[in-house]
Amino acid sequence: MHEPDWQPDILGDGYVQHTIDLGTDPDGEGSVAAVLVRREPRPDESVRGALLYVHGFSDYFFQTELADFAAARGLAFYALDLRKCGRARRAGQTAHYVSDLALYDAELERSLAVVAEEHPGLPVVLMAHSTGGLVLPLWLDRRRAAGRVAPVAGLVLNSPWFDLQGKPFQRGPLTQALRVLARVAPLRPLSLPPSTVYGDSVHVGAQGEWDFDTELKPLSGFPVTHGWLNAVRRGHARLHKGLDVGVPSLVLRSDRSHWARTWSKQADRADTVLDVEQIARWSGCLGGETTVVPIPGARHDVVLSERDARERAYAEMGAWLDRQPLTAAETDDSPETDAVAAS
């Protein structure tokens, strides 16, 4: 594989980024790329493996506390901004749009190849948030079915999106309508009322403590398009039939959901985006050994929770990592070769 061209990242000192050219967009929005971010290792840090993180919808990687946590546990840290997301979105492209979640396989394989090349023979733990928590299990199930698990050794999911919010009588008709709308108007946004409840709870300019670029992560989120949500619903359907990700999994979630149109202190102590009961219900569909831990008082992104909740989340993640036999993985088919074929 070609040597990655690491350049300074928007996070400043200690972070670099590598642009992964993915060629022409199958969805017709020009050329696409993904951006892999690396936390630069410090001289006093030992490395026993790596962690590769993937964001959710209307999101990008900025959670440097998570990167420091991984490094402190001997895991070299990488994060991927998927095509049309965050750092990777180009002018004129519909934010976060793909017509099929499997399109992400190309940048996931190539990112994994970079990590494996820089840390040969070492295990890689994958971590994802929200929509990323649906994307990664689907990808891993396809890899496992093809006999390619290594170097992946574990999976951590942070409030994964495992089903559509709402009652069954609402979800069914909407899912059926999306199949038609995705064909005739895939880029048209759904008519959803805007809400900044979650954004206000986390951003330093509102009620939160986290500073991030609101052009890359708007407080009210990006519009949800017919075609993208149809792709997500197809992913949900595949998950619900049962997957086998091939490695042990840890699922972190809040202990409750809170639905509101305006911010209140309750929004700081609950998931205001997803239904945590759905996460609990469908976590068993990952296959293999799965540990589910509700974090009292956690937000949708558990590592952006108030201090007591996120410290609990990090403690649970650390204990789970300590229980995993993160030993050198056997080499299998080159992920780089597969990525080239998929791109």
Image (tube, rainbow, N blue to C red):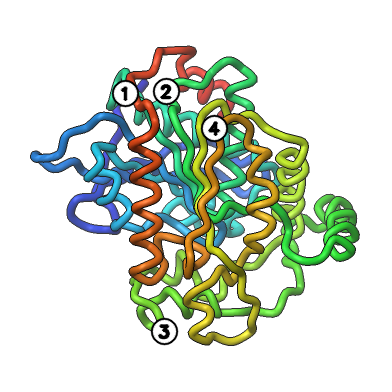
Apparent side of residue 234 relative to residue 14 in the rendered image (left or right): right
The disc at residue 122 is: 1
Give whichever of discs 2 and 4 has the lower sequence position. 4
Residue 213: x and y, percent? Answer: 39, 68
Apparent side of residue 170 relative to residue 233 in the rendered image (left or right): right
- Contact (CB < 8 A) between labels 3 and 1? no
Residue 57: x and y, percent? Answer: 56, 58
- Residue drawn at the location 40% of the way across and 60% of the way down: 303
- Residue drawn at the location 67% of the way across and 50% of the way down: 162
User: Three-letter amino acid code at disc 3?
Assistant: Ala
Nearer to us of marks 4 and 3 is 3
Q: CA distance from mark 4 to mark 3?
A: 37 Å
Q: Nearer the viewer, residue 328 or 227?
A: 328
Q: CA distance from mark 2 to mark 4?
A: 17 Å
Instruction: Classify residue 20 by image quadrant.
Output: top left
Residue 35 against residue 335 in the figure, above or below: below
Give whichever of discs 3 and 1 has the lower sequence position. 1
User: Three-letter amino acid code at disc 1?
Assistant: Leu
Q: Which residue is mark 4?
A: 106
The disc at residue 69 is: none
Q: CA distance from mark 3 to mark 1?
A: 41 Å
Give whichever of discs 4 and 3 has the lower sequence position. 4
Give whichever of discs 1 and 2 has the lower sequence position. 1
Q: Which residue is mark 2?
A: 151
| Label 1 residue SS | loop
Q: Which residue is mark 3?
A: 206
Q: CA distance from mark 3 to mark 2?
A: 41 Å
- Contact (CB < 8 A) between labels 1 and 2? yes
Residue 281: x and y, percent? Answer: 69, 50
